[in-house]
Image: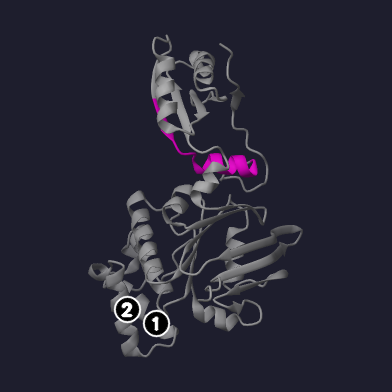
Amino acid sequence: MAEEPPAVRAEGLRKNYGRTAALDGLDLEVPAGTVFGLLGPNGAGKTTAVRVLATLLRPDAGRAEVAGHDVVRHPDRVRAAIGLTGQYASVDELLTGRENLVMFARLYGLDPRAARERAEELLARFDLADAADRRSDGYSGGMRRRLDLAVSLIQRPRVLFLDEPTTGLDPRSRLGVWESVRTLVAAGTTVVLTTQYLEEADRLADTVTVIDHGRTIAEGTPDTLRSRVGGDRLDVVVRDPADLSAVAGLLGSALDAPATVHREEQRISLPAPDRLAALTGAVRALEGATAAIADIGVRRPGLDEVFLALTGRDTDSSTGTTTDTGHETAGPVPA
Protein backbone atom coordinates (compact mmCIF):
# COMPACT_ATOMS: atom_id res chain seq x y z
CA MET A 1 0.00 0.00 0.00
CA ALA A 2 1.44 3.37 -1.06
CA GLU A 3 2.24 5.83 1.71
CA GLU A 4 -0.07 8.83 1.82
CA PRO A 5 1.72 12.01 0.69
CA PRO A 6 2.21 14.81 3.22
CA ALA A 7 -0.69 17.21 3.68
CA VAL A 8 1.78 20.11 3.68
CA ARG A 9 5.30 20.24 2.31
CA ALA A 10 7.55 23.31 2.18
CA GLU A 11 11.10 23.49 0.89
CA GLY A 12 13.41 26.49 1.28
CA LEU A 13 10.64 29.06 1.82
CA ARG A 14 11.88 32.63 1.91
CA LYS A 15 9.97 35.84 2.52
CA ASN A 16 11.54 39.24 3.12
CA TYR A 17 10.05 42.50 4.36
CA GLY A 18 12.62 45.02 3.26
CA ARG A 19 15.89 43.91 4.85
CA THR A 20 14.15 41.67 7.37
CA ALA A 21 13.96 37.96 6.54
CA ALA A 22 10.65 36.69 7.96
CA LEU A 23 11.28 33.26 6.42
CA ASP A 24 14.86 32.23 5.75
CA GLY A 25 14.86 28.87 3.99
CA LEU A 26 12.07 27.22 6.01
CA ASP A 27 11.43 23.48 5.48
CA LEU A 28 8.27 21.75 6.74
CA GLU A 29 6.56 18.41 6.24
CA VAL A 30 3.15 17.69 7.79
CA PRO A 31 1.80 14.12 7.70
CA ALA A 32 -1.85 13.84 6.68
CA GLY A 33 -4.41 13.30 9.43
CA THR A 34 -2.24 14.68 12.23
CA VAL A 35 -1.87 17.79 14.36
CA PHE A 36 1.35 19.60 13.49
CA GLY A 37 2.62 22.16 15.99
CA LEU A 38 4.60 25.14 14.70
CA LEU A 39 6.26 26.80 17.70
CA GLY A 40 8.41 29.86 18.07
CA PRO A 41 8.84 33.17 19.89
CA ASN A 42 7.07 36.31 18.73
CA GLY A 43 8.61 37.39 15.44
CA ALA A 44 9.93 33.91 14.63
CA GLY A 45 7.99 33.69 11.36
CA LYS A 46 5.04 31.47 12.36
CA THR A 47 2.28 33.72 11.04
CA THR A 48 4.21 34.51 7.86
CA ALA A 49 4.61 30.78 7.22
CA VAL A 50 0.88 30.21 7.65
CA ARG A 51 0.03 33.14 5.36
CA VAL A 52 2.31 31.75 2.64
CA LEU A 53 0.88 28.25 2.96
CA ALA A 54 -2.67 29.66 2.88
CA THR A 55 -1.84 31.65 -0.31
CA LEU A 56 -2.29 35.03 1.41
CA LEU A 57 1.38 35.86 0.76
CA ARG A 58 3.57 34.91 -2.18
CA PRO A 59 6.99 33.53 -1.17
CA ASP A 60 10.10 35.21 -2.54
CA ALA A 61 11.80 31.83 -3.02
CA GLY A 62 11.28 28.15 -2.35
CA ARG A 63 8.17 26.08 -2.97
CA ALA A 64 5.27 24.66 -1.01
CA GLU A 65 2.39 22.27 -1.60
CA VAL A 66 -0.81 22.02 0.44
CA ALA A 67 -3.18 19.10 -0.14
CA GLY A 68 -1.08 18.23 -3.19
CA HIS A 69 -1.39 21.68 -4.82
CA ASP A 70 1.38 24.22 -5.38
CA VAL A 71 0.61 27.41 -3.45
CA VAL A 72 1.97 29.67 -6.21
CA ARG A 73 0.87 27.86 -9.36
CA HIS A 74 -2.56 26.69 -8.13
CA PRO A 75 -3.68 29.01 -5.31
CA ASP A 76 -7.38 28.49 -6.09
CA ARG A 77 -7.05 24.74 -5.60
CA VAL A 78 -5.24 25.29 -2.30
CA ARG A 79 -7.95 27.68 -1.07
CA ALA A 80 -10.64 25.16 -1.92
CA ALA A 81 -8.91 22.56 0.24
CA ILE A 82 -8.09 24.59 3.36
CA GLY A 83 -9.62 26.44 6.27
CA LEU A 84 -7.91 29.25 8.16
CA THR A 85 -8.51 30.68 11.62
CA GLY A 86 -6.33 33.67 12.47
CA GLN A 87 -5.20 34.99 15.83
CA TYR A 88 -8.35 37.05 16.26
CA ALA A 89 -11.94 36.00 15.59
CA SER A 90 -13.12 37.46 12.27
CA VAL A 91 -16.87 36.99 12.65
CA ASP A 92 -19.35 39.87 12.17
CA GLU A 93 -20.25 40.94 15.68
CA LEU A 94 -23.48 42.62 14.54
CA LEU A 95 -24.86 39.27 13.35
CA THR A 96 -26.04 36.31 15.37
CA GLY A 97 -24.08 33.08 15.41
CA ARG A 98 -26.53 31.50 13.00
CA GLU A 99 -26.50 34.52 10.67
CA ASN A 100 -22.71 34.50 10.56
CA LEU A 101 -22.60 30.87 9.52
CA VAL A 102 -25.32 31.21 6.92
CA MET A 103 -23.66 34.32 5.47
CA PHE A 104 -20.26 32.65 5.13
CA ALA A 105 -21.84 29.48 3.72
CA ARG A 106 -23.57 31.55 1.02
CA LEU A 107 -20.24 33.27 0.27
CA TYR A 108 -18.71 29.83 -0.19
CA GLY A 109 -21.37 29.10 -2.81
CA LEU A 110 -23.90 26.99 -0.91
CA ASP A 111 -27.55 27.50 -1.88
CA PRO A 112 -29.85 28.95 0.82
CA ARG A 113 -31.17 25.60 2.02
CA ALA A 114 -27.73 23.95 2.15
CA ALA A 115 -26.32 27.02 3.92
CA ARG A 116 -28.96 26.80 6.66
CA GLU A 117 -28.44 23.06 7.09
CA ARG A 118 -24.65 23.44 7.33
CA ALA A 119 -25.09 26.27 9.85
CA GLU A 120 -27.30 24.14 12.09
CA GLU A 121 -24.86 21.24 11.89
CA LEU A 122 -21.93 23.42 12.94
CA LEU A 123 -23.86 25.20 15.70
CA ALA A 124 -24.58 21.81 17.26
CA ARG A 125 -21.06 20.54 16.71
CA PHE A 126 -19.47 23.50 18.51
CA ASP A 127 -22.03 23.69 21.32
CA LEU A 128 -23.45 27.01 20.12
CA ALA A 129 -27.06 26.00 19.41
CA ASP A 130 -28.41 27.66 22.57
CA ALA A 131 -26.71 30.95 21.60
CA ALA A 132 -27.44 30.71 17.88
CA ASP A 133 -29.85 33.68 17.85
CA ARG A 134 -27.76 35.97 20.05
CA ARG A 135 -25.57 38.63 18.45
CA SER A 136 -21.97 37.48 18.53
CA ASP A 137 -20.79 40.71 20.16
CA GLY A 138 -22.33 39.25 23.32
CA TYR A 139 -20.37 36.00 23.07
CA SER A 140 -17.53 35.18 25.43
CA GLY A 141 -14.02 34.89 24.03
CA GLY A 142 -14.27 31.11 23.94
CA MET A 143 -17.67 31.17 22.19
CA ARG A 144 -16.42 33.65 19.61
CA ARG A 145 -13.39 31.46 18.95
CA ARG A 146 -15.59 28.37 18.51
CA LEU A 147 -17.79 30.31 16.09
CA ASP A 148 -14.68 31.33 14.16
CA LEU A 149 -13.62 27.67 14.00
CA ALA A 150 -17.08 26.71 12.77
CA VAL A 151 -16.84 29.28 9.96
CA SER A 152 -13.48 27.85 8.86
CA LEU A 153 -15.05 24.38 8.56
CA ILE A 154 -18.03 25.28 6.38
CA GLN A 155 -16.47 23.78 3.26
CA ARG A 156 -15.03 20.75 5.09
CA PRO A 157 -11.32 21.54 4.55
CA ARG A 158 -8.71 18.83 4.20
CA VAL A 159 -6.17 21.05 5.98
CA LEU A 160 -7.01 23.55 8.71
CA PHE A 161 -4.55 26.28 9.73
CA LEU A 162 -4.98 27.57 13.28
CA ASP A 163 -2.80 30.60 14.01
CA GLU A 164 -2.46 30.88 17.82
CA PRO A 165 -6.15 29.99 18.30
CA THR A 166 -6.20 30.16 22.12
CA THR A 167 -4.26 33.37 22.72
CA GLY A 168 -6.10 35.43 25.32
CA LEU A 169 -8.60 32.70 26.25
CA ASP A 170 -9.27 31.59 29.81
CA PRO A 171 -8.30 28.00 30.75
CA ARG A 172 -11.85 26.64 30.35
CA SER A 173 -12.26 28.16 26.88
CA ARG A 174 -8.82 26.88 25.89
CA LEU A 175 -9.82 23.33 26.85
CA GLY A 176 -12.95 23.68 24.71
CA VAL A 177 -10.91 24.68 21.67
CA TRP A 178 -8.52 21.76 22.27
CA GLU A 179 -11.42 19.32 22.34
CA SER A 180 -12.74 20.76 19.06
CA VAL A 181 -9.33 20.26 17.44
CA ARG A 182 -9.20 16.62 18.57
CA THR A 183 -12.64 16.03 17.09
CA LEU A 184 -11.58 17.50 13.76
CA VAL A 185 -8.50 15.30 13.52
CA ALA A 186 -10.49 12.21 14.45
CA ALA A 187 -12.71 13.00 11.46
CA GLY A 188 -9.68 13.12 9.13
CA THR A 189 -8.74 16.81 9.02
CA THR A 190 -5.05 17.72 9.13
CA VAL A 191 -4.40 20.60 11.54
CA VAL A 192 -1.43 22.97 11.41
CA LEU A 193 -1.29 24.77 14.74
CA THR A 194 0.93 27.74 15.53
CA THR A 195 1.32 28.44 19.21
CA GLN A 196 3.57 29.91 21.88
CA TYR A 197 2.31 27.43 24.46
CA LEU A 198 4.30 24.22 24.89
CA GLU A 199 1.40 22.81 26.91
CA GLU A 200 -0.88 23.31 23.93
CA ALA A 201 1.52 21.55 21.60
CA ASP A 202 2.04 18.81 24.18
CA ARG A 203 -1.69 18.16 24.48
CA LEU A 204 -2.49 18.30 20.77
CA ALA A 205 0.49 17.92 18.45
CA ASP A 206 1.77 14.63 17.06
CA THR A 207 4.90 16.37 15.77
CA VAL A 208 6.42 19.78 16.49
CA THR A 209 8.76 22.11 14.64
CA VAL A 210 10.36 25.04 16.46
CA ILE A 211 11.35 27.98 14.27
CA ASP A 212 13.30 31.13 15.03
CA HIS A 213 14.32 33.94 12.68
CA GLY A 214 12.44 32.12 9.91
CA ARG A 215 14.43 28.89 10.17
CA THR A 216 13.80 25.46 11.68
CA ILE A 217 15.91 24.99 14.81
CA ALA A 218 14.35 21.84 16.31
CA GLU A 219 11.74 19.26 15.37
CA GLY A 220 10.23 16.05 16.72
CA THR A 221 7.59 14.99 19.21
CA PRO A 222 6.86 17.21 22.25
CA ASP A 223 8.82 14.78 24.45
CA THR A 224 11.77 14.92 22.06
CA LEU A 225 11.65 18.71 22.21
CA ARG A 226 11.75 18.69 25.99
CA SER A 227 14.66 16.26 26.01
CA ARG A 228 16.66 18.81 24.01
CA VAL A 229 16.69 21.04 27.10
CA GLY A 230 17.32 18.32 29.65
CA GLY A 231 13.95 16.74 30.26
CA ASP A 232 12.27 16.89 33.68
CA ARG A 233 13.52 19.25 36.38
CA LEU A 234 13.59 19.13 40.17
CA ASP A 235 12.65 22.49 41.73
CA VAL A 236 13.30 23.49 45.33
CA VAL A 237 12.11 26.87 46.61
CA VAL A 238 13.64 28.28 49.80
CA ARG A 239 12.04 30.79 52.16
CA ASP A 240 15.24 32.75 52.78
CA PRO A 241 17.36 33.76 49.74
CA ALA A 242 20.43 33.60 51.95
CA ASP A 243 20.06 29.79 51.91
CA LEU A 244 20.19 29.44 48.13
CA SER A 245 23.91 28.68 47.81
CA ALA A 246 23.97 26.17 50.65
CA VAL A 247 20.89 24.31 49.41
CA ALA A 248 22.25 24.28 45.86
CA GLY A 249 25.44 22.70 47.18
CA LEU A 250 23.57 20.02 49.11
CA LEU A 251 21.38 19.12 46.15
CA GLY A 252 24.21 19.19 43.63
CA SER A 253 26.26 16.76 45.72
CA ALA A 254 23.35 14.45 46.51
CA LEU A 255 22.12 14.18 42.91
CA ASP A 256 25.53 14.53 41.22
CA ALA A 257 24.07 17.14 38.89
CA PRO A 258 24.53 20.86 38.17
CA ALA A 259 22.23 23.05 40.26
CA THR A 260 20.89 26.24 38.67
CA VAL A 261 20.04 29.05 41.11
CA HIS A 262 17.20 31.42 40.18
CA ARG A 263 17.71 34.17 42.75
CA GLU A 264 14.65 36.28 41.92
CA GLU A 265 12.40 33.25 42.42
CA GLN A 266 14.42 31.88 45.37
CA ARG A 267 14.49 28.59 43.46
CA ILE A 268 17.10 25.90 42.75
CA SER A 269 16.61 23.72 39.69
CA LEU A 270 18.35 20.45 38.74
CA PRO A 271 17.86 17.88 35.96
CA ALA A 272 15.69 14.92 37.03
CA PRO A 273 16.01 12.10 34.47
CA ASP A 274 14.54 9.73 37.08
CA ARG A 275 11.71 11.67 38.72
CA LEU A 276 11.27 9.45 41.79
CA ALA A 277 14.99 9.04 42.43
CA ALA A 278 15.58 12.79 42.15
CA LEU A 279 12.76 13.66 44.53
CA THR A 280 13.78 10.99 47.04
CA GLY A 281 17.43 12.02 46.91
CA ALA A 282 16.55 15.68 47.39
CA VAL A 283 14.34 14.99 50.41
CA ARG A 284 17.07 12.88 52.03
CA ALA A 285 19.71 15.53 51.32
CA LEU A 286 17.62 18.24 52.93
CA GLU A 287 16.70 16.26 56.06
CA GLY A 288 18.22 17.99 59.04
CA ALA A 289 19.27 21.03 57.01
CA THR A 290 18.72 24.38 58.70
CA ALA A 291 17.29 25.96 55.54
CA ALA A 292 13.50 26.40 55.46
CA ILE A 293 12.04 24.85 52.29
CA ALA A 294 8.92 26.50 50.87
CA ASP A 295 8.25 23.99 48.09
CA ILE A 296 9.76 20.98 46.35
CA GLY A 297 8.63 19.09 43.27
CA VAL A 298 9.48 17.61 39.86
CA ARG A 299 8.09 19.17 36.72
CA ARG A 300 8.53 19.25 32.99
CA PRO A 301 10.35 22.28 31.54
CA GLY A 302 8.10 25.16 30.58
CA LEU A 303 7.92 26.89 27.22
CA ASP A 304 10.15 29.75 28.31
CA GLU A 305 12.90 27.33 29.33
CA VAL A 306 12.66 25.42 26.04
CA PHE A 307 12.82 28.58 23.96
CA LEU A 308 15.53 30.13 26.09
CA ALA A 309 17.66 27.02 25.62
CA LEU A 310 16.96 26.74 21.89
CA THR A 311 16.87 30.39 20.86
CA GLY A 312 18.69 32.31 23.58
CA ARG A 313 15.62 34.50 24.26
CA ASP A 314 12.23 34.16 25.88
CA THR A 315 8.87 33.84 24.15
CA ASP A 316 7.90 37.50 24.51
CA SER A 317 10.97 38.85 22.76
CA SER A 318 10.45 39.98 19.19
CA THR A 319 13.66 41.98 18.85
CA GLY A 320 16.12 39.11 18.62
CA THR A 321 18.00 40.25 21.72
CA THR A 322 18.91 37.88 24.52
CA THR A 323 16.88 38.19 27.72
CA ASP A 324 18.83 38.31 30.99
CA THR A 325 17.43 35.41 32.99
CA GLY A 326 19.10 36.28 36.27
CA HIS A 327 20.32 32.84 37.21
CA GLU A 328 23.63 31.11 37.78
CA THR A 329 24.73 27.50 37.49
CA ALA A 330 26.90 25.54 39.86
CA GLY A 331 28.25 22.04 39.42
CA PRO A 332 28.15 19.28 42.00
CA VAL A 333 29.95 20.19 45.22
CA PRO A 334 32.63 17.69 46.31
CA ALA A 335 31.86 15.82 49.50
Foreground: 68 or 314? 68
Q: Position of residue 96 (x, y in %)?
A: 32, 73
Which residue is disc 2 drawn over?
Answer: 119
Q: Position of residue 300 (x, y in %)?
A: 46, 39
In the picture as drawn, the residue positioned furthest to the left comes out as 130
Taking the image as shown, residue 324 lies to the left or right of residue 252, namely right
Is residue 93 visible in the rendered image? The answer is: no
Taking the image as shown, residue 126 lies to the left or right of residue 267, namely left
Q: Is residue 147 magenta?
A: no
| Residue interval drawn in magenta | 296-312
In which quadrant of the rendered view does residue 308 lie?
Answer: top right
Is disc 2 placed on a helix, strand or loop? helix
Amino acid, disc 1: Ala
In the picture as drawn, the residue positioned furthest to the right comes out as 19
Which residue is disc 1 drawn over?
Answer: 105
Residue at (48, 25) in percent of width and height: 267
Foreground: 31 or 48? 31
Q: Categorize mark 2 by other alpha carbons within 10 Å: few (<14), some (14-19), many (20+).
A: many
